[in-house]
Image (cartoon, grey):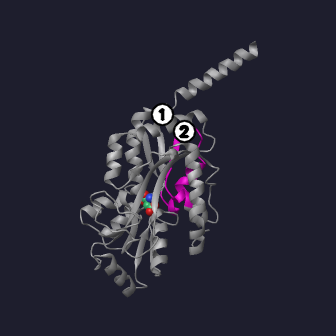
Amino acid sequence: MKVLLIAALFAGMASVALAEYPEKPVTVVVPFAAGGPTDKVARDLGEVLRQKLGQPVVIENVGGAGGTLGAAKVAKASPDGYTLLLHHIGMATSPALYRKLPFDTLNDFEYLGLINEVPMTLIARPKLPATTFNELMKWIKANKGQINLANAGLGAASHLCGLLFQQKVNVDMTTVPYKGTGPAMNDLLGGQVDIMCDQTTNTTAQIEAGKVRAYAVTTTKRLSTPALAKLPTLDESGLKGFNVSIWHGLYAPKGTPKAVVDRLNAAIRAALMDPELIKRQEALGAVIVTDARLSPAEHKKFVAAEISKWGPAIKAAGQYAD
Ligand code: ASP
């Protein structure tokens, strides 16, 4: 009887504790610099998540090493639902890029759900002489050995896209790594670097304002977003088979209680139905996820499949870090 009473008391306390989650601000770590594409997604989503969770959502930018520093920080954080990670395709490419990744992608996180898919664009500094893709190809051939390609470090989407681009055009460029493509964009606008492949969530406004050269999109279909609809695909421009689309998802440290994971997943699903969020993301070329990958189990399965998909291509390119 006594044992039962104590057990009931503990069960009651546990459900009260979980029922109260979240009872303080939730931090979302963005593993790239502020002002970049992943940061934009996090701030957009964070604003709606705040309403759904009833607590402030604080964005913390932990840039560096292509997103792996921020991911490592969350992998080691307390599994209480108050430190989350918003990360992209780098979750799936970094296992092949880093010999000693400081976390285990599939085993050190609770998967909370996929958020969006984002195409990329090939852009250049505003005064680069080439205005079309064909002119760019000629310019690249004429300037071999002197071309700077900006990216957000080994493991970033801009790195993956730039790597595939260099392979396809068979020209090696000097890569200039930043803590995110937010700061990289500033240098591109200032003419300090030549070329970048970056997500539309960061490039659409600059393309629309005519502040950068824009040559093509990285998906196999043209985009419908007005500012981007005129851009050809890299595939139709001659780089047959070029197809890169970035996705973002949310993660918690392994061991986060199931009730907290469920609460977060429900909040994410509700947030992703917000018409304003959908509109804002679409205007930047991004597509909100509405399929089964919204569930933690399917999100994890998808990342596992992406690891298998990208690993061989990356290893073939022979790029990795210790
Ligand atoms: N997502 C990175 C950022 O937010 C850029 C990248 O992955 O290329 O800066």
The magenta stretch spans residue 209? no
The magenta stretch spans residue 64? yes
* CA gap, disc 2 and disc 1: 10 Å
Which residue is drawn at the image coordinates 44% and 48% (left, top)? 289
Secondary structure of residue under mark 1: loop
Q: Amino acid at mark 1?
A: Lys
Which residue is identified by label 1? 24
Q: Is residue 318 visible?
A: no
> Is tag 2's residue or tag 1's residue first in the polypeptide sequence?
1
Query: Which residue occupies the extreme bottom position in the image?
Result: 142
Say few, some or many: other residues with alpha carbon within 10 Å of mark 1 (under 14 / 14 to 19 / 20 or more). few
The location of residue 18, given as percent across then percent down, is 56, 29
Say which mark, if any, is on residue 75. none
Is the CB of mark 1 within 8 Å of ligand 1? no
The location of residue 301, given as percent across then percent down, is 59, 50
Q: Amino acid at mark 2?
A: Gly
Q: Is residue 295 visible?
A: yes
- Is 137 above or below relative to 277? below
Q: Are marks 2 and 1 in contact (CB under 8 Å)?
A: no
Which residue is identified by label 2? 81
The location of residue 114, given as percent across then percent down, is 49, 48
Please state, as top left, top right, bottom left or bottom right, where the N terminus lies in the image: top right
Secondary structure of residue under mark 2: loop
Q: Which residues are magenta?
A: 63-92
Whether residue 51 sits left or right of residue 293 in the image: it is left
- Is 70 above or below relative to 129? above
**Location of residue 176 (image quadrant):** bottom left
